[in-house]
Image (cartoon, rainbow, N blue to C red):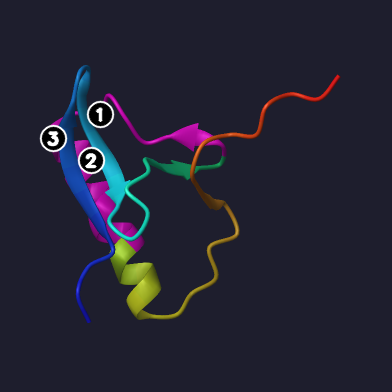
Amino acid sequence: MSDRYAVRPDRGGFSVVDLWTGLVAEIAATPQQGLSAADAGHTAQVMNERLQRDEPSAVLRLGPRAAPRG
């Protein structure tokens, strides 16, 4: 199985990107961008390992946040 998440450079450091959608991954509503190379690499590794083990990703959210209502 190939990895779904990869590290890509961004303006503030590095992002963890979902290769299926091209969007920055979010964990607990926090975009995984502007990270150090080491932190982004570790995050992508953990996310890929969880997918390989079929663990539920209760705090994982992909894509842009929904606009506030009101």
Membership of 41 in magenta stretch: yes
Q: Secondary structure at mark 1?
A: loop
The image quarter in which residue 36 lies: top left
Q: Residue at x 23, y 58 (%)?
A: 45
Spatial separation of the CA atoms under disc 1 and disc 3: 6 Å
Q: Position of residue 65 (x, y in %)?
A: 58, 34
Q: Which residue is mark 2?
A: 40
Q: Is residue 45 left or right of residue 23?
A: left
**Circles 3 and 2 in contact, beta carbons < 8 Å:** yes
Q: CA distance from mark 2 to mark 1?
A: 6 Å
Q: In this picture, is 12 found above or below 17?
A: above
Task: Determine the residue positioned at 28% across, 64% down.
Answer: 4
- Amino acid type of the residue that numbered disc 1 sits on in the rendered structure: Leu
Residue 8: x and y in percent read 17, 39
Disc 3 to disc 2, C-alpha distance: 5 Å
Q: Tell whether label 3 touches label 1 (CB within 8 Å).
A: yes
Question: Which residue is labeled 1 in the image?
Answer: 35
- Quadrant where the N terminus is found in the figure: bottom left
Mark 2: which amino acid?
Ala
Left-right relation of 29 to 25 = right
Q: Residue at x 14, y 38 (%)?
A: 38
> Closer to the N terminus: mark 2 or mark 1?
1
Q: Which residues are magenta?
A: 29-47
